[in-house]
Image (spheres, rainbow, N blue to C red):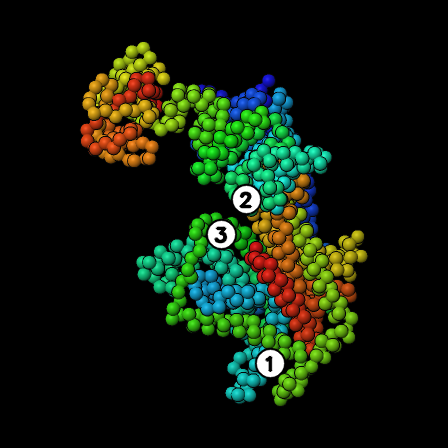
Amino acid sequence: MRSVASNSATADAYAGTGRHRRRLAPDLVRIAGLVVVAVVVLAPIALIAYQSVLDGPFFMPKATWSLSSYAFVWTDPEFFQALRTTLLLAAGMVAISVPLGAILAFLIVRTDLPGRRWIEPLILAPIFISAIVLAFGYVVAIGPVGFISLWFKSIFGFVPWNVYSLGTLIVIAGLSHAPHVYLYTASALKNLNPEVEEAARTVGAGVWRVAFTVSLPLVMPAIVFSGTLIFLLGFEMFGLVLILGDQGGIVVLTTYLYKLTNLLGTPSYHLMAVVAIVIVLVTLPLVLLQRRLLRGTARYATVRGKGMAHRPLPLRKWRWPALALVMLWLTLTIFLPLAGLVLRSVVTSWGEGIGVLDALTFSNFENLFQYPNLVRSIVNTIVLAAIGGALAVVVYTLVALIAHRWQGKGPAVLDYVVITPRAMPGLIAGLAFLWIFLFVPFLTSFRSTLISLWVAYTVVWIAYGMRLISSTLMQVGPELEEAGRVTGAGLGRVTCDITIPLIRYGLLGSWLLIFMTFTREYSTGVYLLGPNTEVIGSMIVSLFGSGGLDLVAALSVINVLLTGLALVLALKFGVRVHA
Amino acid sequence: MPELVVEDIHKRIGAVRILNGVSLSLDPGEVVSLLGHSGSGKTTILRCVAGLETPDAGRILIRGKPLFDAAAGIEIPPEERGLGMVFQSYALWPNKTVAENVAYGLKLRREPVARASARVDQVIGKLGLSGMADRYPHQLSGGQQQRVALARAIVYEPPVLLLDEPLSNLDAKLREEARSWVRELILQTRISALYVTHDQVEAMAVSDRVLLLRGGAVEQQGTPEEIYGHPATAMAAAFMGSSNRIAGTVAAVDGDYARIDHAAGSIWGKRIDPVEVGTPVQGFARIERTRLCGEPGRGRLAGSLSHSLYLGERWEYSLSVGQLGWRAWGQSREKPGERFIEVARDDLWLFHDEKRS
């Protein structure tokens, strides 16, 4: 016993003196990288916080410290109305999306639902369609003079729905966000050992009892996680409300902020900053909560079993009703708005008494090319998504490599840094970057180039991109890299010769997903919109405001085609859509 | 001068002490096994030598040159240690061919291309992998992958080869063949090797010396014959081979020997620990040294045979001796019933029974 004690005393005395020579240099590089990432990523949010406590735009010399902006917003009844509507919208979306997405996931992953192989990619489609495009699709399909509305009215003499009501908005938002719940629930269900369900069936449970008492409770962490995600997305929602809420005077925090832009005649940056801070105060805790939940789901994955080949649960008499439910959802969420959109893009004008065939034309697309800024927006979108997306993947990979196999607290700090922008809606991030590119001296020359947009997009999506890359990196066994080190390659050499080649397919997949994400993005570009920085998303927002619906329809179709093309490619390469 | 010296290394992860002062040395051309249960720290020692883990204290030297010295603040990164390592999962790079996997170490050492490829061909040929040079790891069988991993580790002639359970992913039959050619290969190449395994038979087969580890410290070391035939501790006796265990109190002492009185009879054993009359002891007797007898006699314990198992090359008898289960081997089927077991007094090793003292 005595010898053990003296040994451990030696160990204690030595502990902490030994480990220097090797770790020092790589650690310095990593810490430097972490600092750079933190500055770039946290600068916009810091600027917004600073702006919110000034009584005028921060670049005005006479602006002084003041809480007057908070007082202004705090006494504005419209702000509280917007806050209430936002909460109602987010809660309503959770109530619709979560059960729907969970049931869809169970049906597709676990049962013998007819046609489930080809339904799965369709279910994911709404994730890759811009909300603003989707909203516009609903307007032209079931709006007051929409195709479906007019058709319904010609038969029954009236239209029972109002696309501009809050109820419709919530239903549409809920339906179109179910795929997010589907993604997380489905991937958790795929990891679930089917034997637990088979065991339930052997003791006499039917398919629905299995679903509600075994399968879904076992993937509850994933469902709860997706619930917080939906609430977050609801809180940040901009495009759907801008287009569907405008007529009925429905205002949420993001659209309230958008309208503040020119409220006082001069830019009311200080008021906008306050609203942005209010939004971030709600979303940041949600993002941090999600981080915790996600770690919980990762632990839950131990339910995994060995022989995963299993027979799907037979739905029997529920086969066709279940399929009908899925088809109804697909129709309402995808076919309806997209069909409306495509139809609207090939007619010049629309209203009661006009036959579709008479009005059929390609002139909307031809007209598009009359406007240099619209042509630029298409080219810019493609450049930003393809080249910018590739560069973003390079950045995300470098950032992910900072944390890769880094011992100690570094990776956790980095993780917090990169998820922070997730709390900033794209609209607000775009605003912050506008300010940065307007007033940081050596950056002003980039203001009217795609570089400003690229920086904003890359920062806004850094959490998503990092998740894509890290999940690929995690699949590289540590011993493959250790074997390289022992064989004689340094850390950098191992990264270039072993790690990067091993994740090349993952990088290709990430690029396709980032391409889709950047193509679909609209809100980040709204405030950065200017000559040479047009993208399809922000042009749609701008054109919709000025009533150029023909062009909006054509642009939207092009946007959907671009993302669709990338989605088809991604599915062909077997890219896992879920990070 | 020894090829490799490990001096009193300690390693702690959080509150858990993984290594509690391990020392060992490896002479040129010697094969030393680190043997122990999982959690005994054997793989950690290997990884500390490789530079993949950092000990908290101690020194590691190769040919007298320090690779790691906690007191002096020296730690050479793994890539500069020039060692060869075979991983348990082989860790072959799936995106490189067999030839590229093997050649990588030579490329890093800036070997001229022509000489490198000649050397790769030579090693690949020696390991019976000729014709596989352009295949990818996933196109090889487990046994072939294992050979590629070895080829990759020895191609640049490292002074010391580290092997981390290299055969544990092979099936039983292949493993028996492999341990023989691995031993032969290591002797042929005159390389020194540190070999981690939890399989005692493998450890004895491949190595000149075995280090038995327990709880991050060396329990006993010696040649395979010493470790197996003369265990110094109860743990060593229990770990090596298959043993019957008897617990009791010393009733009499006679020189190197002591007597245990047991309900089933009295039996003499050898005092490995200096046990005295009245101390609680535990005794171990290898199954192959336990004889089944029909009649009572001196130094025999009474028991009853409950059943016989047919194992192919022998029969195994299961007996209850008092409260204890005992096993013995023989060449014929025996009917259940009253029997006696006999162990020569040199074959029953007596140790302090720490749990009962």
Q: Is residue B251 visible?
A: yes
Q: Amino acid at mark 1?
A: Gly
Q: Quadrant of the C terminus of chain A?
A: bottom right
Q: Secondary structure at mark 3?
A: helix
| Residue that badge 2 annotates | B140
Lateral position of residue A541 relative to residue A102, left or right: right
Lateral position of residue B178 relative to residue A449, left or right: left
Q: Secondary structure at mark 1?
A: loop
Q: Nearer the viewer, residue B79 or A451?
A: B79
Farthest residue in the top direction? B255
Q: Residue at x 23, y 21 (%)?
A: B300
- What numbered label is drawn on residue A297? 3
Q: Secondary structure at mark 2?
A: loop
Q: Quadrant of the N terminus of chain A?
A: top left
- The chain to which mark 2 is attached is B
Q: Residue at x 58, y 25 (%)?
A: B190
| Residue that badge 1 annotates | A146
Q: Amino acid at mark 3?
A: Thr
Q: Is residue A115 above or below residue B302?
A: below
Q: Count neighbours of disc 2 (C-alpha within 10 A) and say few if under 14, some if 14 to 19, many if 20 or more.
A: some
Q: Amino acid at mark 2?
A: Leu
Q: Mark 2 to mark 1: distance in Å?
A: 63 Å
Q: Count neighbours of disc 3 (C-alpha within 10 A) and say few if under 14, some if 14 to 19, many if 20 or more.
A: some
Lateral position of residue A447 relative to residue B205, left or right: right
To the question of a shared chain for discs 2 and 1, the answer is no
